[in-house]
Image (cartoon, rainbow, N blue to C red):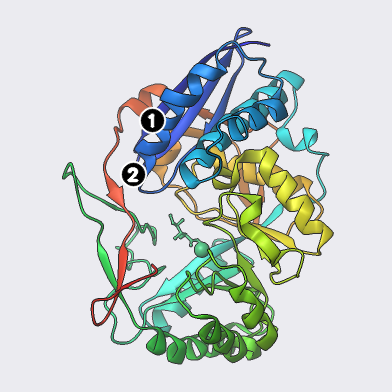
Amino acid sequence: MKIIAADVIVSSPGRNFVTLRVTTEDGVTGLGDGTLNGRELAVEAYLREHVAPLLVGRDAGRIEDTWQYLYRGAYWRRGPVTMAAVAAVDMALWDIKAKAAGMPLYQLLGGASRTGALAYGHASGRDVPEILDSVRAHLAQGYRAIRIQSGIPGLDSVYGVASPAAPGQRYDYEPARRSQDAHPRPPEEQWDTRAYLRHMPRVFEAVREEFGPELPLLHDGHHRMTPIQAARLGKDLEPYDLFWLEDCTPAEDPTALRLVRQHTTTPLAIGEVFNSLHDYGPLLSERLIDYVRSAVTHVGGVTAMRKLLDLAAVHGVKSGIHGPTDISPVGMAAALHLDLAVHNFGIQEYMPHTERTLEVFRTSFTFEDGLLHPSDTHGLGVELDDEAAARFPYVPAYLPVNRLTDGTVHDW
Ligand code: EZ4
Ligand code: CO
């Protein structure tokens, strides 16, 4: 089945998404997600200028060969822009293969290993009463596992804390700030690690006191601690039995986790900013983490994610696929097919997309009783409405930059 077209669609139904649509001579189409938060137009240009022309005329069925051709064949391999582009192609080709086979993708990946994928939701608040309300609201929506992020006394705005919802509105969290300015600057947030380290154990103490020992609780450190600070937080949170502590140190130095691991039994997760299996370095072979956090969209697609999860399985490490709203519904669907199929599934991050996003992306996956299911629709199970997409053109939007209270730039 020859590829006759590869079109890039950038749309902004509430936030920006980069989608690749591959069309074959038989009229079968496949979608892939190449969204890279705040750098969408770089992926668009990479796909349009350097990848799409290579796809036309290729056999859509040769997924592994196409992956290797785009990865190894480019000489300049890896990097977030390149790998998001490779991922978009890879997802689209798996979508086509599964549609042509008349199956949902998870069947091609070995079939279902479970009835659904345990999802975690995102509770947050500026203070403990707001957090407890947010946890209650998530439990009422059916979530069976919950991430907790908290405001820090003395800091105005902190990663992961949603602004309180207006009456009747959803409690949304979206870190990339949109601007109609053609060349906007990223917004800035403030940070103080010592204040954070003092405050978080109190937050988890209050949540456990209110909701008991059963509920799986997660927390994201978002790359802000030094190894010794992360070791201390892991230790201080041990009484509250976290499901995981995510991204406790900056991810570019995987060896930092050796020190953290020596000090705490709090399970560790890392990898959302990784764009290659090789970024994990010794993390898997030395068993320095418990969950891999890569996104299908950023690690190079279904092909790369399957290899990563198989390598993780060899070392007893489980999946925790990244699933914020900056992963499009296409990337989310790809994650759900893998979640259903692989043996070493751990948990799936889930932040529902807005109504507006779902006008552009027609999804079929379901969320029921805390479990996600990709549905039995053939392929990935997501289609893109071109007319709706055209109504939402690109809007510049950037993630925040973080500064310490003295002005020093810090990891966000
Ligand atoms: O900040 O996806 O675990 N989830 C996260 C996300 C990331 C955003 C960055 O684009 O850390 O909220
Ligand atoms: Co994270």
The quadrant of the rendering that contains the C terminus is: bottom left
Q: Which mark is residue 382?
A: none
Residue placed under numbered mark 1 in the picture: 45
User: Could you say which quadrant of the image residue 103 lies in?
Assistant: top right
Residue 226: image location, x then y, percent: 49, 80
Q: Is residue 57 visible?
A: yes
Residue 22: image location, x then y, percent: 55, 20
Sequence-first tag of 2 and 1: 2
The quadrant of the rendering that contains the N terminus is: top right
Q: Residue at x 29, y 63 (%)?
A: 166
Q: Amino acid at mark 1?
A: Ala
Q: Residue at x 44, y 45 (%)?
A: 36
**Distance Cα–Cα, label 2 vs label 1:** 22 Å
Q: Confirm if mark 2 falls within 8 A of ligand 1.
A: no
Residue 142: image location, x then y, percent: 60, 62
Q: Please determine whether, in this image, residue 141 is positioned above or below residue 365.
A: below
Q: Residue at x 63, y 14 (%)?
A: 58
The answer to which of 248 and 77 lies nearer the viewer is 77
Residue placed under numbered mark 2 in the picture: 14
